[in-house]
Amino acid sequence: MAGYNLEAIEAAPLKEDVDIVIPTIRSLDFLEQWRPFLKHYHLIIVQDGDPSINIRVPEGYDYELYNRNDINRILGPRANCISYKDGGCRCFGFMVSKKKYIYTIDDDCFMAKDPSGKEINVIAQHIKNLETPSTPHYFNTLYDPFRDGTDFVRGYPFSLREGVTTAISHGLWLNIPDYDAPTQLVKPRERNIRYVDAVMTIPKGVLYPMCGMNLAFNRELIGPAMYFGLMGEGQPISRYDDMWAGWAAKVVCDHLGFGVKTGLPYVWHSKASNPFVNLKKEHKGLHWQEDMVPFFQNLRLSRESDTAAKCYMELSNMTKEKLTEVDPYFEKLADAMVAWIEAWEELNPPVDGKDVKAK
Ligand SMILES: O=c1ccn([C@@H]2O[C@H](COP(=O)(O)OP(=O)(O)O[C@H]3O[C@@H](CO)[C@H](O)[C@H]3O)[C@@H](O)[C@H]2O)c(=O)[nH]1
Ligand SMILES: [Mn+2]
């Protein structure tokens, strides 16, 4: 295959353990370019918008595709917890998957190259990130000590070198950065051309803006907390789907003792969404984030919440109690969080009557 590094391409780690979830309201043509790396994996496509549109899946891919009619049929009255006309609909794919790991990617993201010109195998890098521990209790100044060619630096306590299990791997983007609408408006031509060859653990107690564009996680450990909220048509807010999921999942990871990494792998984000449209979708979120972030920063989950699902139910109560004073929308969101967990548990009954518990 001209122009491709065949050795890297044939490496399809854990192909039986990974589902790729793609939300789309456009087309899946981007999968043509990804074929060398992604063809080995099963796709779960969540088609947003008009369900009567027939979407073409490029030849050779193994996939299941769900449109709004399918979501309504499968979830019944609880289908209302899945966003419509917002990329947050992707979380339906997390719920129906049965795999250990999820990789989710947007339909305008393409294979990027590292500075040596080699195509980046995104899944291989995410799996490396997820299958090696995180270090949330003390920062390693050479970043991820579990990468080849590096280690813990002098002064790193030996008692902390075991690290903790990694639950989330947050990948980054070259070309179009994940900016909010005001930043897009003032910097319309800004492009990210800086490839930073680093993976690092986000420290315990620190929140971050999680982007859903290039994201992998351990569904068994943290799946129920990866709810992308109630956004889009019929709601006062859009485009905060991944932010909500990121804040919630991080506090749940911190509570349960799991780690979150950010950095490699990169994808090439090709399409700048319209900043004026985005501003309309985002403007409430831009205000509300000033309350949502302190809410997540200050909350404390109880000892009884020892699984992601239990933590999430507790978070729903807290959302209702604390954020409804910001806007009545949060009561609706809190109810949707409960519906999400109920639907999750129905589709994912605990194995041997047990949920995955914190260490
Ligand atoms: O109504 C919709 C809109 C979009 N989608 C699908 O969601 C992803 C991301 O959409 P898009 O590329 O338009 O958004 P960006 O601004 O570039 O991306 C960031 O915004 C986030 C917030 O939603 C998103 O996670 C970020 O990556 C595409 O696959 C669209 O097809 C949709 O399903 N429904
Ligand atoms: Mn995009």
Image: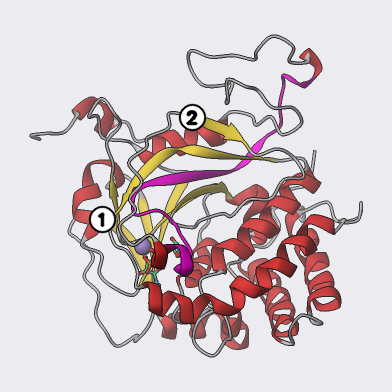
Residue furthest to the front in view is: 186
Relative placement, left or right, of 234 versus 103 is right
313 vs 69: above or below:
above
Tag shown at residue 250: none
Residue matched to label 2 = 198
**Picture residue at 61% right of the left edge, 88% below the top:** 77
Tell me, yes or no, whether the highlighted magenta stretch contains residue 173.
yes
Residue matched to label 1 = 61
User: Residue 250 location in percent, x, y?
Assistant: 69, 51
Q: Is mark 2 on a helix, strand or loop?
A: loop
The colour mode here is: secondary structure
Q: Which of 210 and 228 is in front in this view?
A: 210
263 vs 103: above or below:
above
Residue 249 occupies quadrant:
bottom right
Can the viewer see residue 309 in this picture? yes
Q: Which of marks 2 and 1 is nearer the N terminus?
A: 1
Q: Give the range drawn in magenta.
A: 160-183
User: Residue 20 location in percent, x, y?
Assistant: 41, 54
Q: Quadrant of the C terminus?
A: top right
Q: Quadrant of the N terminus?
A: top left
